[in-house]
Image: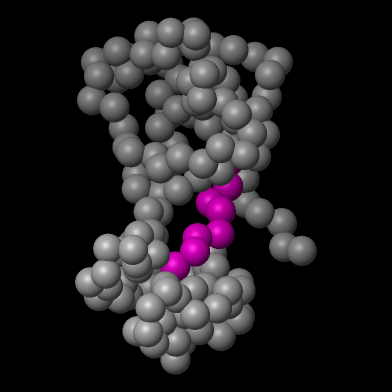
Amino acid sequence: MEEEEKIVTLIGTKQANVGDEFIFLGVSNSKRCEECRLKKSCMNLEAGRRYRIEHVRDEIKHDCSIHEEGVRVIEVIEPRIRVAIDAKYAFKGARIVFEPVNCEETELFDLCHPSGLKKGDKCTILDVIGDAPGDQGLKLVEVKRM
């Protein structure tokens, strides 16, 4: 199995739970963050991307003017993302450039436009799950950004 690239960053103590996923919303505009000596370690993720907490380093807690119980050092990865794509491109191991499918049905919108994946992202299809709900010629796949 391929080793996942882990990123070391900081997160609020209350949010530091192994297995939890989150979307990094970007750098805070708070003056308190701008003046913080840890901001480069805290704001080192890419905005709009999904991350999963793989490890929490419990030995150190840092004070933070934003998080009431401070922040912890964590290791995150970008997890696999489940997405609906045109069936003609759905082959395990295929490399694709993500182009969101026009899903009109509400139930498929989140699968056609998953959080953490952007138009133009280069991805590898890790697994083909099966047909997407409805009869639209779509397959559900799990991808990993390259």
**Occupied quadrant, residue 115:** bottom left
Q: Name which residue lies at 30% across and 13% down.
A: 32
- Residue 114: x and y in percent read 38, 59
For residue 108: magenta? Answer: no
Count of number-bearing discs = 0
118 left or right of 55? left
Q: Which residues are magenta?
A: 76-83
- Residue 102: x and y in percent read 25, 75
Res. 139 visible in picture: yes
For residue 81: magenta? Answer: yes
19 left or right of 24? right
Residue furthest right in the image: 1
Q: Is residue 48 above or below residue 73?
A: below
Q: Is residue 112 above or below residue 86?
A: above
Query: As rendered, which of 130 and 82 lies closer to the eye?
Result: 130
Q: Name which residue lies at 40% across and 24% down.
A: 39
Q: Name which residue lies at 34% across and 48% down.
A: 48
- Residue 22: x and y in percent read 46, 40
Q: Looking at the image, what colour scheme do you see?
A: one colour
Q: Main secondary structure of the magenta part?
A: strand
16 left or right of 39? right
**Occupied quadrant, residue 60:** top right
- Residue 54: x and y in percent read 65, 39
Query: As rendered, which of 72 and 104 lies closer to the eye?
Result: 104
Q: Is residue 44 above or below residue 134?
A: above
51 left or right of 97? right
Q: Name which residue lies at 62% across and 45% down.
A: 6
The N terminus: image quadrant = bottom right
